[in-house]
Amino acid sequence: MASVWVGFLFVSSGLATPTRNPYDAIVQRNVFRLHEPVPPPAPLSETPTPKDDGELTLTGIVDFRKAQWALIILTEHGMAPRRYTLPVGQKEDNLEVLAIDATTATARVRHGSAELVLTFDRHGPPDQRALEELSRKYVEQARPFVDEHTRAHELREQRESERRALERATAEAELAARETSQQQ
Amino acid sequence: MKRIGMSILLWMAGTAGMVEAQPTNVGQWGATQPFPYVSVHACLLPNNKLIFWDYSGNARLWDPVTTAITTAAQPGRNTFCAGNSSFGDGRLFVPGGHIQNNVGLPSASYYDPVTDTWTSVPNMNAGRWYPSSTTLANGDILVTSGDDNMAVNDLPQVLQAGNNTWRDLTAARLGLPLFPRAFLAPNGKVFFATSTSRYLDTAGAGAWSTVGNTIFSGHDNYGSACMDQSGKVYWFGGGDPPTATSERIDLNAATPQWGAVASMPQARRQNNATILPDGRFLVTGGSSSGGFNTEDGPKAAMLYDPTANTWATLAIESDYRGYHSIAVLLADGRVLSCGGDNHANGQVFSPPYLFNGARPTISSAPATVNYGDTFFVGTADATGITKVTWTRLGSLTHAQNWDQRINVLSFAQAAGGLNVTAPSSANSTPPGYYLLWILNGAGVPSQASFVRIGGSAPPPPPPSPPVAPSNLTAKTSGKRGVGLSWTDNSSNETGFKIDRGTDGVTFSQIAAVAANVTSYKNNGLTSGVTYYYRVRATSGAGDSAYSNVASADAR
């Protein structure tokens, strides 16, 4: 029997939220895995060190009777994400799949010099659709404010265009007078 | 466990973009990342995090390496529609904010990325909604424009970084557009690339001088302006309907004036222009249709080469980015494009130079340098390096990057690296943090190192309010008058405020006197009434506590 695992990550943890925030409901659900501020970052005098080895995301395991593949995305700093479909024993770039266990939906890989077991819990992709849904709801809640704000700007731009035209005419006269003065 | 058909379909959808893209020529957009808020404001910090906030000032940090979004300290007021620019030591200054449309906050504060804290500075003269914030050569920050209460605040003010006090440019009051695009110019003045362009001399009480009009009158209606490495300022887009017109002014010319350069391949407004490590400008997002923010679909990135005066059309972004969108150069050479009304997400663009072969690598670089210093940059790729630049960390809102600028740095090969010379002028290089890049002959930039130039230690905390006066006495003085005297206990007051009441409980201010004055005569009183007085000292940092209450009868 063929089977395929696809990773979903569901997260719910506490979050301290700002007060008087119209979007508190979204924040409190915390699907973005926001958390309290991390310990203070390194002092400014230290140059940030980019990550070199990249991050692996397990996006699927395909298990046919005679073949298995691990579906993995490698995200390296400053590079476009690279996708791999690798059977056991195959190496591509710096990534090699050592073993696949379809029962537990895990893949043991060697990434550079490191060996690790990829699981959907720890290395699976976030539930993109859920995140998008939350962003969409936020946008909908913000829309009345956005519309009012835009109208205010449209009105102000009418005034501004009049001010701008007057200012330009004044500047042209000033510069013309300056030029005449210099010629004399 | 999911069925195989669905799973393979999902995976195929994820790979489709890779096949279509030709990144060597047009670059490549990454996956769209949902954001919890619309990133109306965004600033790259020296710790390689991007702080952003939305319509309510909800501040978050985005990590360019992991893409994780975490909560930042909150500013304590609504910083939507505030200004943003950086101090020399990397703190982010944010003046003004939102009370309601066209009504701004007078408060200002700075965000310290080291401590993840916001600290207030004394209030500005009045509210500012859509002010510009410009870092000056000495590290002070000029704040201009912004609506106070349905009308523009016309007083330019300079926040003095050394003591966090305001200096008012009282001789330079001028009504300006909202968010005027302003640049520290090579001559040390601040150039306003507004429709009628001007210099502001920030010395003393300030002085304006007219430079000239732009060719297209409407650029400052949500076009994007930026400065190249040689003091030339460019306008890209803006206007309603939007223009494709681009123009340039050379601030090093004897008589600077705007002149046309190659037009953009497509008209835009609400677009963002980003300086890349190689000195080219990447224009992203915007609307090509008339109207304030007409959502007319995703746009191709456009690349302008100021040397060749040519444009190239690059890959198309996945989402529309209009009003309230941002784009910022990251330390890995990519550009984050995100936000815009109704679009709470972001997408990272990898410019074509990231697909032109191996990247040179910086193995070491100093964390700080001084003006004119020659410093060593370690790299195993020294022999292949043809260009060294640095770009100031970006801070954006409303289609403008207020901090970005670029310097091309002279260099020489040395054993194991390069000897690079820092600029000698703070006019071309205001103090602060820069992304240091080395580029090889194929135009491929390294990942950047963060380097700070100038910018001393953080200034002391805001000054304390003056000490309260004491020993207030009140004596009947002449006909219908009361004379007051008090002891001045403060050395930093700018004056005294005098309150009066008739019940000893409720008071209102009746007068203000200058610093070091210790007496006041209150005339024109009503005979037979007992008057109560109290006095307090005042300064830009606030008011002192009150003195004791004293009373006297008027005859």
Image (cartoon, coloured by chain):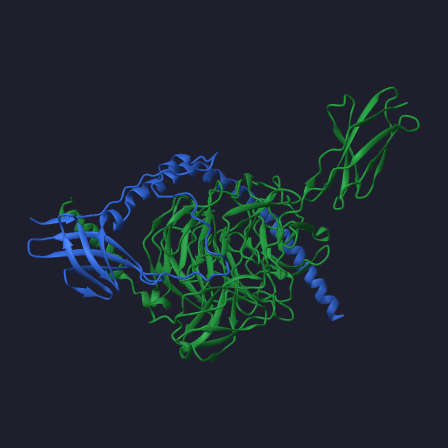
Chain colours: A blue, B green
Q: Quadrant of the C terminus of chain A?
A: bottom right
Residue A134 spot, x, y in % from top left: 34, 40
How many numbered dots are placed on residues in this image?
A: 0
Furthest toward the top, the residue is: B528
Q: Is residue B68 above or below residue A48?
A: above
Q: Is residue B195 visible?
A: no
- Quadrant position of residue A9: top left
Residue B335 spot, x, y in % from top left: 41, 59
Residue B283 spot, x, y in % from top left: 44, 60
Viewer-proximal residue among B170 and A154? B170
Residue B280 spot, x, y in % from top left: 45, 67
Query: Viewed as shown, does residue B69 lie left or right of A164?
Result: left
Furthest toward the right, the residue is: B478
Query: Going 17% across and 60% down the picture, which residue do you hit?
Result: A98
Query: Going 38% across and 74% down the picture, which residue do you hit?
Result: B442
Viewer-proximal residue among B537 and B548? B548
Q: Is residue A169 above or below residue B439?
A: above
Viewer-proximal residue among A112 and B217? A112
Q: Is residue B56 visible?
A: yes
Q: Is residue A119 above or below residue B547?
A: below
Query: Going 34% across and 50% down the picture, which residue do you hit?
Result: B33
Viewer-proximal residue among B192 and B7? B7
Query: Viewed as shown, does residue B299 lie left or right of B187?
Result: left
- Quadrant position of residue A136: top left
